[in-house]
Image (cartoon, rainbow, N blue to C red):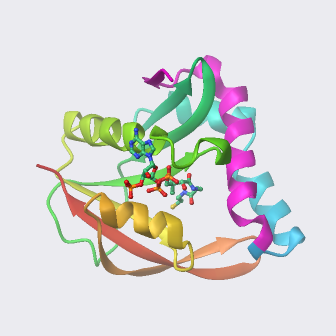
Amino acid sequence: MNIVIRPGAAIDATALAELAARTFEETFAAHNEPEDMALYLASAYGTSRQQKELLDPDVTTLLAEVDRELAGYAQLRSGVTPECVSGEAPFELWRFYVARSWHGRGVAHALMRRVELEASRRGARTLWLGVWEHNERAKAFYRKNGFVDAGSHVFMVGTDAQTDRILVRQLS
Ligand SMILES: CC(C)(COP(=O)(O)OP(=O)(O)OC[C@H]1O[C@@H](n2cnc3c(N)ncnc32)[C@H](O)[C@@H]1OP(=O)(O)O)[C@@H](O)C(=O)NCCC(=O)NCCS
């Protein structure tokens, strides 16, 4: 199994939009009203939206490929930081998703190592993220990767206000 992590480029927009919508649905469809899912998916994913992100200098997109098949992606961004995040030079790990068929096979591990590298390269000293309070697998994964709970914020899925835990870790 050959896992390659590479930066995303504008040409990847359609494939990224498809993967991003699919992984969001796989993860959250069972826990949300279909109308809220539809609203969220329409607002967050689509070729032009992902193309804008891929061209945005404040966003770093990393794609994970296994034998040339897109298997996961991560996005880092700089910008507004919640008050509960206190470390120096904070960057947000905005999105981190692996397609279901690749869970538990080392793709997430490889992607996280590259996230650390790219975040450090961009000058980050602190990584933070929001994870749905009931997303137990993701919380366990982040704990294994050194993240600790620092607080919470509200995340809207369509019309539904949900609680995300905010997790933080320092980069060496
Ligand atoms: C959260 C997520 C990224 C975690 O990825 P994962 O591959 O499922 O990670 P897990 O920690 O659950 O599984 C890792 C296991 O894979 C197995 N594994 C197999 N090969 C491996 C390898 N080469 N390297 C590391 N682990 C490997 C190990 O058993 C490992 O368990 P261990 O770390 O306890 O030894 C993934 O489940 C996912 O994308 N979920 C849906 C989207 C999501 O919730 N994203 C987060 C939004 S905030």
Instruction: Give the residues drawn in magenta, as a range.
Output: 1-30
User: Looking at the image, which residue is at 18% across and 41% down?
Assistant: 123
User: Left or right: where does residue 1 sit relative to residue 119?
Assistant: right
Q: Is residue 21 magenta?
A: yes
Q: Is residue 159 magenta?
A: no
Residue at the limit of the structure toward the left, as seen here: 172
Work out whether 53 lies above or below 37: above
Q: Quadrant of residue 101?
A: top right
Work out whether 64 lies above or below 78: above
Work out whether 168 lies above or below 8: below
User: Looking at the image, which residue is at 89% across and 70% down?
Assistant: 35
User: Left or right: where does residue 20 sit relative to residue 167?
Assistant: right
User: Looking at the image, which residue is at 59% across and 41% down?
Assistant: 102
| Closer to the camera in the image, 140 or 127 | 140
| Closer to the camera in the image, 161 or 137 | 137
Badge count: 0
Secondary structure predominantly adopted by residues drawn in magenta: helix
Q: Could you say where residue 84 lies in the image, as x and y percent from the top left?
A: 28, 78
Q: Could you say where residue 10 lies in the image, as x and y percent from the top left?
A: 59, 21
User: Looking at the image, which residue is at 34% across and 70% down?
Assistant: 167
Q: Could you say where residue 82 lies in the image, as x and y percent from the top left?
A: 35, 72
Q: Quadrant of residue 135?
A: bottom right
